[in-house]
Image: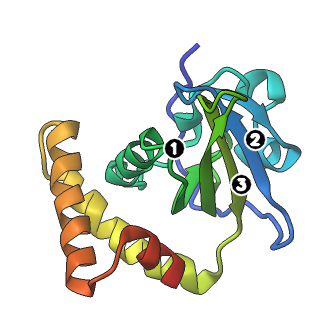
Amino acid sequence: MARPTIVPSGKEGYWSDEEIIVSKTDLKGKITYANDVFLRLADMSVEELIGQPHNVIRHPDMPRCIFKLLWDTLEQQKEIFAYVVNLGENGDHYWVFAHVTPSFDNNGNVVGYHSNRRKPSINQVAQIKELYSALKTEENKHSSPKKGIEASEKILIQMLQDKGISYEEFVLSI
């Protein structure tokens, strides 16, 4: 069943600095596990969430090039850190600082992905919002999502080159 279009409420969902959101997905990004904090912020039951693609909580303001970077990194069997704004079923948003890693079986094969997410500070969100706004604006200028992602990815790469740092160094420096 497709998720109905959720209209952002403009309200931020509350979660404490001590809480951690945890989820696991299969290789296609379908949720196989979600902890209580995730369920509460997504405003969904475990029955509604398990089996759904993780992008079921994607906020419309989130630049798609960040997710492309995330998937490209995971396909290389590497971990990634990223700031993400998510959208609950009730329309409330919540920012996370995500650490996503491949999950391996005993033979070293990737069998899924694991994500721990912490609450970023107000200052961290303010810094990343400016970049994400520019990336999303660029994506929206293009008629096809693919062209939009390519264009915003170029902006991100150029910004990192100008700073002389990697994406990971950038994210961890915020």
Q: Quadrant of residue 109?
A: top right
Q: Are marks 3 and 2 in contact (CB under 8 Å)?
A: no
Q: Residues within 10 Å of mark 3 (few under 14, many from 20)?
A: some
Asked whether residue 174 is in view, the answer is no
- Residue 113: x percent and y percent? 62, 38
- Residue 134: x percent and y percent? 27, 69
Q: Amino acid at mark 3?
A: Asn
- The circle drawn on residue 58 is 1
Q: Quadrant of the N terminus?
A: top right
- Residue 139: x percent and y percent? 22, 52
CA distance for labels 1 and 3: 16 Å
Q: Quadrant of residue 17?
A: bottom right
Mark closer to the chain start, 1 or 3: 1
Residue indicated by mark 3: 116
Q: Residue at x 82, y 30 (%)?
A: 45
Location of residue 34 with respect to 97 vertically, above or below: above
Nearer mark to the viewer, of 3 and 2: 3
131 and 107: which is toward the camera: 107
How is the rendered protein coloured? rainbow
Secondary structure of the residue carrying numbered label 2: loop
Mark closer to the chain start, 3 or 2: 2
Q: Residue at x 22, y 58 (%)?
A: 152
Residue indicated by mark 2: 43
Asked whether residue 42 is in view, the answer is yes
